[in-house]
Amino acid sequence: MSLDDERRRIDAIDDALLELLDERAKVARAIGQQKARAGIDAHDPARELALLARLEAQVAARAEPNFPTHAVRPVFREIISACLSQQLELEVAFLGPPGTFTHMAAQSAFGLAPRYQELATIGAVFDAVERGHARYGVVPIENSTEGGVTFTLDELVGRAVRIWGEVVVDVAHCLLRERGDLTGIERVYSHPQALAQCRAWLGKNLPAAELVPAASTAAAARQARGDPAGAAIASRLSAELEGLGVVRAPVQDRTQNATRFAILALEEHPPTGDDKTSIVYSLKHERGALRATLALLEARGLNLTRIESRPHPERLWEYLFFTDFEGHSSDPEVGAAIAALAELSPSVKVIGSYPRARPPGRP
């Protein structure tokens, strides 16, 4: 067939896809009306996860799939998001401004259809969810290079907000500038976490440059715009939004660099069979207290995936321990382990049970 013939086939397929999408939106609206009459929440995250997993499995099972498996989830996430917008308007708060990795994580989780609220601080995102101004919030919680995000961990201790989900995003830091080279750079703007993740590269390539902390990587790109002697460490999306060039990429010290983002909500995510639970607990001030709690969790058969300590906000030289392990708090064995831990610890708080995210590039 000629090139024109193949293009006509593509046009016909696109037309058919558009008709099917329109039909899907019609059915989704009818389902939403039935849910409304029955008093059922229009947003069904467990159903969404099952749908995405089923479609990915279908493509992966084909001997020679033409459509890439890794593209199934983002494509259908947008379709689901658009159809859900026919039933309700989701409001999602995130640590802004637009162009941050948190913004990218929020869109990865919810698509483009929700009404996004960009907020200036992590605390403001917690406030928006806690006060009902947004149903969900998205904040960074852990980086593979720099560890836990202390602002998020501290907020989780005293808030009613829970971790409802998680998203893992590959972080590829870029050096952005209006000019296309490194000459004349006197200042490098970025978020302190990003500066820390690029410490060795900056020391080698721009040892004399002043490192200027910014509220976010996107804010750093904004500051670098119009500063002839300035550059920013931020994402490619920030470069596009601010009209900057990518001078070097990637510039982080570790090639494999990812950030885990927490999705916040007031309600708990229903169990999916592939979940994580996050807790925070304190210890009695006595010898072997930490070892005893870890031994208890191991004896109960829980697989710990993370533990990190933070200073207690009210007690000098005492610490809180943030711990993640596999399983949902509604699972009998997990619930029993948490109850047993409460007998050893002065305080135990479940800060969320949620579907375990798959790191980028892994099945």
Image (tube, grey):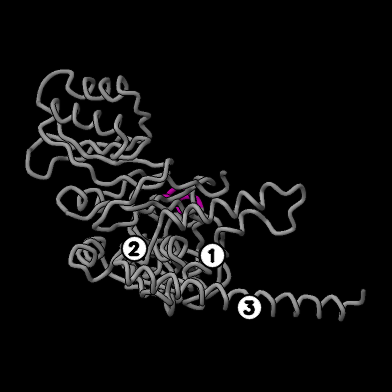
Above or below, 314 relative to 238: above
Q: Give the residue number, with chain letter if any, for mark 1.
A: 182
Residue 212 marker:
2
In magenta, the rendered stretch is 197-204
Q: Is residue 188 visible?
A: no
Label 1: element kind: loop
Q: Tell me the distance, in whole angstroms, between the alpha carbons under discs 1 and 2.
A: 17 Å
**Relative to 58, 231 lies left or right:** left
Q: Give the residue number, with chain letter if any, for mark 3.
A: 18
Q: Is residue 345 visible?
A: yes
Label 2: element kind: strand
Label 3: element kind: helix
User: Which residue is at a point 51% across and 61% down the rendered structure image?
Assistant: 174
In the foreground, 307 or 9: 9
In the foreground, 224 or 109: 109
User: Which residue is at a point 67% across and 53% down the rendered structure image?
Assistant: 59
Q: Amino acid at mark 2?
A: Val
Q: Earlier in the sequence, mark 1 or mark 2?
A: 1
Q: Tell me the distance, in whole angstroms, between the alpha carbons under discs 1 and 3.
A: 47 Å
Q: Amino acid at mark 1?
A: Leu
Main structural element of the magenta stretch: helix, strand or loop?
A: helix
Q: Earlier in the sequence, mark 1 or mark 3?
A: 3
User: Which residue is at a point 48% across and 64% down the rendered structure image?
Assistant: 235
